[in-house]
Amino acid sequence: MEIEAAAFRRLLAHFDQRSDVQNIDLMNLAGFCRNCLSKWYRAEAEERGVEIDYDQARERVYGMPYDDWKKINQTPASAEQLASYEKNKPKE
């Protein structure tokens, strides 16, 4: 479990260093993004009896409040990115 936790922290540090990589790029290439990771984090916490709301989980993943991260790092998605997302988005 220690190794898994360390790998998770390393993934978050990598995302911090690569704030230029947009969530839509992650979704289009890997099928998940920082928001997905936040949802998984929250779900796993709740499974273990730890209450964390979505905003708290996103702050953990983004390293700051989500709205702040968006203002600093998020760029508008291109038509090509949006088309790719619509074609490949996960089925609910």
Image: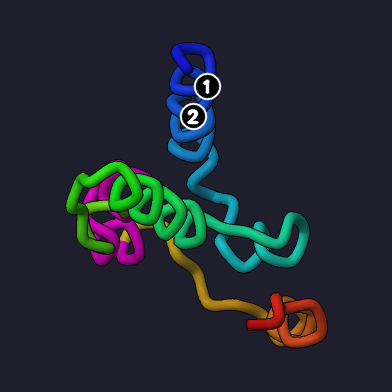
Left or right of 41? Residue 3 is right
Q: Residues within 10 Å of mark 1 (few under 14, many from 20)?
A: few
Q: How crowded is mark 2: few (under 14 residues within 10 Å), some or many (20 or more)?
A: few
* Residue with the mark numbered 2: 8
Point out the stretch of residues depicted in magenta: 58-71
Instruction: Give me the C-alpha separation between circle 2 and circle 1.
Output: 6 Å
Nearer to us in this view, 82 or 4: 4
Q: Is residue 15 magenta?
A: no
* Residue with the mark numbered 1: 4
Give the residue at x 56% y 62%: 23
Check contact, mark 2 vs mark 1: CB within 8 A: yes
| Secondary structure at numbered mark 1 | helix
Q: Position of residue 11 (x, y in %)?
A: 53, 31
| Secondary structure at numbered mark 2 | helix
Magenta region's main secondary structure?
A: helix
Mark 1: amino acid: Glu
The C terminus appears in which quarter of the rendering? Answer: bottom right
- 9 w.r.t. 2: above or below: below
Q: Is residue 67 magenta?
A: yes
Left or right of 52? Residue 32 is right
Q: Position of residue 44 (x, y in %)?
A: 39, 47
Mark 2: amino acid: Phe
The number of numbered badges drawn on the structure is 2
